[in-house]
């Protein structure tokens, strides 16, 4: 049965099916993957990930901490530089084996569609509920400690939270491979804070002669990740808060362009993709209006903190804007986000 009677204005809930969990990723068709493959002419690759221990510390988000590596253990024995002769006197092997405690969205990342929902009256009963893309429900489809014992859900999450629907494994199974198109906002607007609405984005696209087509993954360079790298693990939150261009999620024309363009994802090198906090307005509203429009209404994934300088410089030098993008997240069932090591091939 359909989970909702009413869908948010401007949303595409149900357009890809009542149980769809991919949203706009449905537009990355086989032909779109071939378009990406046709952009491979030089055979050169670029890693678009930061080292996953950057930005460093937790001043950008107090809930997210750098990864912590440790050796695996057998009973009380750490398996690091472990001589197997300890268990077999004939063995010459030495083993090292580790594990990591990792905030899934600490560094270069994908947001799954379960990352941002909204209060919305999907039932039409006059009472707003906590909902996610395509009407999936908090407490039913996305569960946490406050939702009681869900150990029998069959999710094997190993902990007290699970996106039973809209988890990041859907992106991984899709593959996240297709054609990327890079817009170099840093080259146009520099390191100062610039709110990029529809007019500013169109100015950059027109100046560079960039075409954006349905199914493309839009990749935005602002220079933010380069500033993070330069800070060498000691991020200056005051500087970064006002560094570089950021999408203006309060610009209705920009949101409409995202809807009309048919882009499948937005990947940026900055924190949050959009300017946060958003320009001040009054009344009930989304504090992250771009996330609200993309994740909640359209099922359009967002990616943050990608490193784009080397790719951007090469594309500019070669008069190009499109490339093959391969960026699958971890296939970790029921996770709400994931680190990613995107690769651009030109």
Image: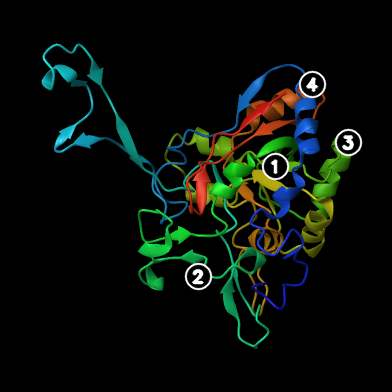
Q: Residue at x 36, y 63 (%)?
A: 151
Residue 27 in picture, x, y percent from top left: 76, 47
Q: Is residue 321 visible?
A: no
Position of residue 297 relative to residue 157, above or below, is below
Q: Are there few (<14), some (14-19), or many (20+) residues within 10 Å of tag 3?
A: few
Q: What numbered label is drawn on residue 276? A: none
Residue picked out by circle 4: 318
Query: Which type of secondary structure does the marked residue at label 1 adopt?
Result: strand
Identify whether 14 is placed above or below 257. Answer: below
Residue 159 sits in quarter: bottom left
The residue carrying mark 2 is 140
The local crowd at label 4, few if under 14, some if 14 to 19, many if 20 or more residues have their Cα within 10 Å, is few
Q: Which mark is residue 209?
A: 3
Q: Is residue 225 visible?
A: yes
Percent x, y of residue 96 = 27, 24
Answer with mark 2 or mark 4, whichever residue precedes in sequence.
2
Circle 1 is placed at which residue position? 220
Mark 3 and mark 4: span between their CA atoms? 14 Å
């Amino acid at each position: 049965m359909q989970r909702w009677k009413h869908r948010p204005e401007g949303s595409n809930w149900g357009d890809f099916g009542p149980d769809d969990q991919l949203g706009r990723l449905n537009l990355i068709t086989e032909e779109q993957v071939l378009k990406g493959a046709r952009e491979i002419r030089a055979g050169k690759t670029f890693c678009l990930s930061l080292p996953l221990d950057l930005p460093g510390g937790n001043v950008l988000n107090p809930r997210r901490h750098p990864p912590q590596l440790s050796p695996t253990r057998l009973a009380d024995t750490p398996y690091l530089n472990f001589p197997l002769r300890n268990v077999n006197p004939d063995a010459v092997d030495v083993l090292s084996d580790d594990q990591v405690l990792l905030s899934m969205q600490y560094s270069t990342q994908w947001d799954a569609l379960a990352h941002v929902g909204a209060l919305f009256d999907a039932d039409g009963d006059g009472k707003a509920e906590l909902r996610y893309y395509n009407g999936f429900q908090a407490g039913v489809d996305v569960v946490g400690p406050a939702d009681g014992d869900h150990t029998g859900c069959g999710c094997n999450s190993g902990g007290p939270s699970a996106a039973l629907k809209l988890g990041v494994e859907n992106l991984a199974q899709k593959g996240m491979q297709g054609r990327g198109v890079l817009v170099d906002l840093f080259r146009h607007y520099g390191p100062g804070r610039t709110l990029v609405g529809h007019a500013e984005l169109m100015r950059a696209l027109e100046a560079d002669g960039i075409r954006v087509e349905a199914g493309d993954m839009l990749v935005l360079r602002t220079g933010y990740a380069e500033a993070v790298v330069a800070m060498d693990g000691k991020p200056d939150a005051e500087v970064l808060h006002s560094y570089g261009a950021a999408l203006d999620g309060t610009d209705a024309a920009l949101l409409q362009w995202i809807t009309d363009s048919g882009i499948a994802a937005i990947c940026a090198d900055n924190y949050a993709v959009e300017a946060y906090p958003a320009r001040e307005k009054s009344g009930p509203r989304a504090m992250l209006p771009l996330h609200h429009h993309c994740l909640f209404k359209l099922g359009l994934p967002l990616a943050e903190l990608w490193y784009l300088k080397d790719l951007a410089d090469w594309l500019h030098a070669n008069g190009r804007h499109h490339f093959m993008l391969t960026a699958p997240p971890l296939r970790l069932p029921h996770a709400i986000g994931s680190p990613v090591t995107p690769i651009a091939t030109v």
